[in-house]
Image (cartoon, helix red, strand yellow):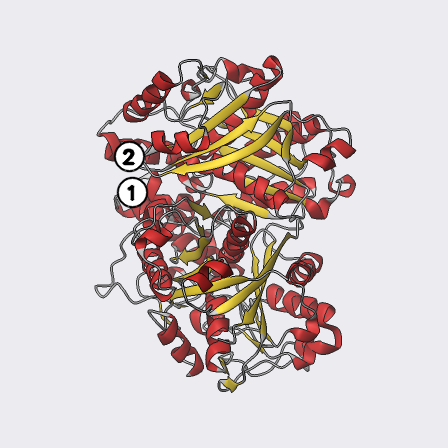
């Protein structure tokens, strides 16, 4: 059974500037939901978002996603205890839903400076100390950073590298906020995963990064992993540009289990994709029940988008870094705003109210994106 | 580790009626009009943006060339057929148009037809829907080197057992927004205010596990070899690692720009016996270039019968350069 060492983590969301502060906020049930800071709220039904507060003057500026990415990668490298020489040639795979399209909007509408090289993250990723790349920017919608992790794992498995960085970043932009708004019922105020009365998705923003390392190399450095990566299954629904299919999502879960060599009986917690939309939540729950069978009602489920908003590209790694903290600190964050389950979710154990004690051994992390791109990851606790 | 081979190529490019035309690259023909219905028929094209239509046309050709079905219901091993698209400029005009619409009125004025195109991976997902590809689906937006990155990542998906076959497509549409951004970028990079010509088209490859290809009687054109990356400026050193012996053919990057051409000239000076085909005359190809170079490489290998080809894209506008070896028979 192959497993890879997750040796470092980095994370930025609306509620925290690093993994520790994010996790503390999550366990306290603190959400980043707030009135829109910069967009003209009069033009939308949804007037709220889960934004990062780095615009004290209320004016937007380009390249925020790039800056958060550099910082998240820096955090991950530091937490892995790696020096610049040791990450020099590490491939960096960045998953994003919107790359720097916000900066493009500001270039187009407000004369911000921008060049084609700013649209992707080759420069930003390589600004973390010591890194030179290769840097690949994957624009894979809401599953992007989990896809990045899958490709990073493959590079290690194929002997291309001994250490790789998987990351993700997204800043909200007007066009996607508008598209999300148009598909919500009548203006969401809250992102409420799996709730019967959920009104739709609301965007968030942030970045995340993990260092993936060959276990022998980590051991040779005298360190233990924060957690083990068992594997990621990726599929495409090939069904509809924006709506998911049950078959594609189920297959991603099954593929993850197969590649990881785990059975559903071993999975102790689900960090759900949980976007609070009619389609995703219903589809995700149905797929989960179909794959887990009788076990489904005994696996605690949580959805951190209830506190971070839909961070899109980085959301898979946001959940993964949180799952790692859960395993290390023994607490599962609650799904904030959850009151009553959707019909298909009756009987499921959705963690809510407050953080729940527990040290799961194996976690499943779901990420399903626009365009039917699906990635499910299995992570194992490091008993270090 | 399983070998990965190219079993089909496709092209939809103004100025190039077919892959062989890339061997003597020329600027786009005056007055050329892209007519998607010619290859794609009339159905299912409504609301698709230009990049998506160009990509569908190129992939349509590549699947035919590979002897693979095009209809989802007939697709071979659909769960193990994936897609990687490389594009940087694809949905820029849609995004800007949506912003203009919202700012002039409200979100209610946004056309739902534009909605899928606001997400950068629309091309990859539409290809999957149209041709029935349920394996890994990736959208690479890595700048100038993205096309080569896409071929490499697709090959890795096969080597890692995630797919048996992968469609790789590079596409860049000529849109007003793309042209304006590239012009601004040129000013920032070289202080050059001349309006660069953008290529307008798509190129596609079908990659396949070699054994799977042999089992169904498919004809391989090239084997996918080693990949290498050079941060901006370090191209010569990186090429020495990936190609310790000079290749028979090199497809270099960025010949339209003086600094990139200067580096390429130094490399060519050392590789005196190496043939070179610079695709610069077709225009700035951005994320499409690496895949286009792959199509050209296969055309060259078919004519010559054998050889080692190196393709390099990127090294422009501050981007790093990605390189890949493509090897002709015997394997």
In the displayed structure, B233 sits above or below B295; it is below
Residue A56, x across and y down, in percent: 23, 66
| Cα separation between marks 1 and 2 | 8 Å
Q: Are marks 1 and 2 in contact (CB under 8 Å)?
A: yes
Residue at 69% x, 29% y is B66
Q: Front-most of A79 and A352?
A: A79
Q: Residue at x 66, y 65 (%)?
A: A283
For the residue carrying disc 2, how many other residues have a C-alpha within 10 Å: few (<14), some (14-19), or many (20+)? many
Q: Is residue A127 above or below residue A78?
A: above
- Snapshot quadrant of residue B213: top right
Q: Is residue B89 visible?
A: no
Parent chain of label 2: B
* Label 1 chain ID: A
Percent across and percent down for residue A335 are: 51, 78
The answer to whether residue B237 is visible is: yes
Q: Dividing the picture into quarters, in which one does residue A1 lie?
A: bottom right
Q: Quadrant of the N terminus of chain B?
A: top right
Q: Residues within 10 Å of mark 1 (few under 14, many from 20)?
A: many
Q: Nearer the viewer, residue A102 or B139?
A: B139
Count how many numbered circles sit on residues in the image. 2
Q: Is residue B55 placed above or below B161 in the rendered structure? A: above
Disc 1 and disc 2 on one polypeptide chain = no
Q: Which mark is residue A114?
A: 1
Q: Which residue is mark 2?
A: B184
Front one among B115 and A363:
A363
Q: Pick the quarter of the image with the C terminus of chain B.
A: top right
Residue shown at the point (37%, 52%) measured from the top left:
A87
- In this picture, residue B249 sits left or right of residue B319: right
């Amino acid at each position: 059974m192959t497993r890879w060492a997750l040796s470092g983590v980095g994370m930025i969301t609306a509620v925290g500037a690093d993994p520790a502060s994010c996790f503390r906020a999550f366990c306290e049930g603190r959400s980043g939901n707030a009135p829109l800071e910069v967009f003209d709220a009069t033009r939308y039904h949804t007037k709220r978002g889960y934004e990062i507060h780095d615009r004290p003057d209320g004016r937007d500026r380009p390249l925020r996603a790039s800056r958060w990415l550099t910082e998240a990668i820096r955090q991950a490298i530091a937490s892995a205890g790696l020096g610049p020489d040791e990450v020099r040639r590490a491939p960096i795979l960045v998953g994003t839903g919107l790359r720097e399209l916000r900066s493009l909007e500001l270039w187009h509408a407000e004369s911000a400076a921008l060049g084609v090289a700013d649209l992707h993250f080759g420069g930003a990723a390589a600004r973390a100390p010591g890194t030179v790349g290769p840097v690949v920017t994957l624009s894979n919608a809401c599953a992007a950073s989990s896809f990045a992790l899958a490709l990073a794992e493959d590079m290690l498995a194929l002997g291309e590298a001994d250490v790789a960085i998987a990351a993700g970043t997204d800043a909200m932009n007007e066009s996607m906020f508008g598209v999300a708004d148009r598909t919500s019922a009548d203006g969401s105020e809250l992102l409420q995963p799996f709730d019967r009365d959920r009104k739709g998705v609301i965007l968030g923003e942030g970045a995340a990064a993990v260092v993936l390392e060959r276990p022998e190399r980590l051991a040779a450095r005298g360190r233990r992993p924060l957690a083990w990566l068992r594997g990621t299954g990726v599929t495409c629904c090939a069904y509809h540009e924006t709506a998911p299919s049950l078959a594609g999502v189920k297959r991603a879960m099954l593929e993850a289990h197969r590649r990881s060599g785990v059975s559903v009986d071993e999975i102790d917690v689900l960090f759900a994709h949980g976007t609070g939309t009619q389609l995703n939540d219903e589809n995700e729950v149905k797929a989960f029940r179909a794959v887990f069978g009788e076990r489904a009602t005994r696996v605690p489920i949580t959805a951190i988008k209830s506190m971070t908003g839909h961070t899109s590209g980085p959301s898979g790694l946001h959940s993964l870094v949180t799952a790692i903290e859960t395993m290390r600190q023994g607490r599962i964050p609650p799904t904030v705003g959850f009151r009553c389950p959707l019909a298909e979710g009756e009987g499921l154990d959705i963690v809510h109210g407050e953080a729940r004690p527990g040290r799961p051994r194996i976690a499943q992390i779901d990420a399903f994106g626009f365009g039917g791109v699906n990635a499910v990851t299995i992570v194992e606790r490091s008993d270090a | 580790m399983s070998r990965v081979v190219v079993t089909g190529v496709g092209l939809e490019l103004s100025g190039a009626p077919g892959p062989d035309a890339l061997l003597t690259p020329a600027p786009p023909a005056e007055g050329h009009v892209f007519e998607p219905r010619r290859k794609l028929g009339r159905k299912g094209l409504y609301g698709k943006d230009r990049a998506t239509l160009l990509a569908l046309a190129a992939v349509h050709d590549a699947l035919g060339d590979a002897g693979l079905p095009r209809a989802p219901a007939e697709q071979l091993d659909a769960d193990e057929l994936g897609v990687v698209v490389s594009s940087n400029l694809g949905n820029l005009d849609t995004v800007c148009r949506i912003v203009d619409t919202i700012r002039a009125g409200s979100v209610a004025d946004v056309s739902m037809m534009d909605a899928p195109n606001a997400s950068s991976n629309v091309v990859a997902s539409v290809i999957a829907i149209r041709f029935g590809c349920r394996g890994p689906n990736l959208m690479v937006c890595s700048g100038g080197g993205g096309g080569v990155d896409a071929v490499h990542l697709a090959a890795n998906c096969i080597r890692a057992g995630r797919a048996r076959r992968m469609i790789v497509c590079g596409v860049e549409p000529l849109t007003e927004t793309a042209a304006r951004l590239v012009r601004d970028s040129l000013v920032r990079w070289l202080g050059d205010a001349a309006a660069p010509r953008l290529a307008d088209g798509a190129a596609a490859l079908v990659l396949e596990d070699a054994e799977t290809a042999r089992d169904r009687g498919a004809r391989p054109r090239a084997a996918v070899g080693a990949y290498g990356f050079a941060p901006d400026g370090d191209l010569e050193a990186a090429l020495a690692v990936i190609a310790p012996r000079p290749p028979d053919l090199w497809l270099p990057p960025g010949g339209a720009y003086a600094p990139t051409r200067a580096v390429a000239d130094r490399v060519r000076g050392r590789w005196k016996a190496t043939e070179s085909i610079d695709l610069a005359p077709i225009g700035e190809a951005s994320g499409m270039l690496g895949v286009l170079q792959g199509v050209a490489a296969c055309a060259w290998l078919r004519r010559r019968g054998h050889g080692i080809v190196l393709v390099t894209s990127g090294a422009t506008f501050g981007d790093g350069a990605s390189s890949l070896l493509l090897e002709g028979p015997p394997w």
